[in-house]
Amino acid sequence: MKKEMLENFIQYTEERFTKRIVYREGDSTVFILNFMPNQALPAHKHPGTNVYLLVLDGDGTFSINQKPVKVKKNDVILCTGDEELSFVNDGAQNVSLYVMLNKIPDDHYTKDI
């Protein structure tokens, strides 16, 4: 059994969004993405795995296959690995996203940034 407090992974920097790994076990990983206003996650895919996203705080806009999807606190998104995904914090407050990948496409998905 492992226990973590998510608040320990909610860290913002003015330079860029942050990614903090909460767990990495076998082929699965859980991490928190943190965005200050106007920070963005570039478009990308997660080949071979689904992506589960929970908005912990704030609001913003995902682009999923180039279609905008507005989200706010407590919204949950599921994307397949074939869908192109990006995010922008276009709101006035900080945003944190809880992200789970059940099969890690490659090791660069499991690093803090």
Image: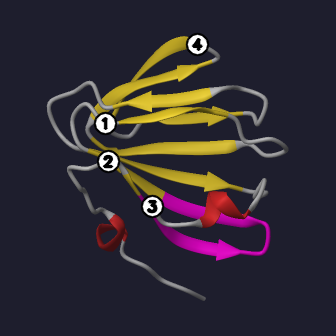
Please, is residue 56 above or below residue 91 in the view?
Answer: below
Return the residue at label 4: 66
Return the residue at label 3: 113
What is the distance, in whole Å, between disc 2 and disc 3 at their CAs?
Answer: 9 Å
Callout 1, which amino acid? Gln
- Does the residue at mark 3 contact the one at mark 1 (Cβ under 8 Å)? no
Among the two numbered marks 1 and 4 on one chain, the one whose residue lies closer to the N terminus: 1
- Does the residue at mark 2 contact the one at mark 1 (Cβ under 8 Å)? yes
What is the distance, in whole Å, between disc 4 and disc 2 at their CAs?
Answer: 22 Å
Mark drawn on residue 39: 1
Mark drawn on residue 59: none
What is the distance, in whole Å, between disc 3 and disc 1 at their CAs?
Answer: 14 Å
Return the residue at label 2: 16
* SS at badge 3: loop
Among the two numbered marks 2 and 1 on one chain, the one whose residue lies closer to the N terminus: 2
What is the distance, in whole Å, between disc 1 and disc 4 at their CAs?
Answer: 18 Å
Give the magenta range: 19-31
Q: Is residue 24 magenta?
A: yes
Q: Residue furthest left?
A: 92
Among the two numbered marks 3 and 1 on one chain, the one whose residue lies closer to the N terminus: 1
